[in-house]
């Protein structure tokens, strides 16, 4: 029972609602059945957390990429303006 309580309390705010319901349903099972299911539940909870962390990392990387692209576009436009100014000076 301590394991399921740990799962329910430590990651309740991080787990999806349907997984929280599963944890509570498993807590209500008899000890023998719970002991068989707990290792599987632990793996599901771990993989859910891992997927959430990966998704967060991907979202952060995409945000950084978008920002980098904006900086590059700004730099490209500035370079083009400078090039055009130098061309005008050379033609004069």
Image (cartoon, rainbow, N blue to C red):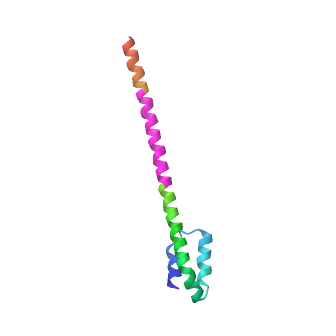
Image location (x, y in percent) of residue 26: 60, 81
* Residue positioned 44% across, 42% down in the render: 68
Q: From where the camera sits, is residue 8 visible?
A: no
Residue 7 falls inside the magenta stretch: no
Decide: is 41 above or below 89.
Answer: below
Magenta-colored segment: predominant secondary structure = helix
Image location (x, y in percent) of residue 57: 47, 56
Image location (x, y in percent) of residue 11: 51, 72
Q: Which residues are magenta?
A: 58-79
The number of numbered badges drawn on the structure is: 0
- Which is more toward the observer, 2 or 92? 2
Decide: is 46 above or below 83.
Answer: below
* Residue positioned 46% across, 51% down in the render: 61
- Which is more toward the observer, 56 or 44? 44
The quadrant of the picture occupied by the C terminus is: top left
Residue 75 falls inside the magenta stretch: yes
Which residue in the rendered view is the most extreme toward the bottom? 31
Q: Is residue 54 left or right of residue 85?
A: right
Decide: is 82 above or below 69.
Answer: above
Give residue 71's quadrant in the image: top left
């Amino acid at each position: 029972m301590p394991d399921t309580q740990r799962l329910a309390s430590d990651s309740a705010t991080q787990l999806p609602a349907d997984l929280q319901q599963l944890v509570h349903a498993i807590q209500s099972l008899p000890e023998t059945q719970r002991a068989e299911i707990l290792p599987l539940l632990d793996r599901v909870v771990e993989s859910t957390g891992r997927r959430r962390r990966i998704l967060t990392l991907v979202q952060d990387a995409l945000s950084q990429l978008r920002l980098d692209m904006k900086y590059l576009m700004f730099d490209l436009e500035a370079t083009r303006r400078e090039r055009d100014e130098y061309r005008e000076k050379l033609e004069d």
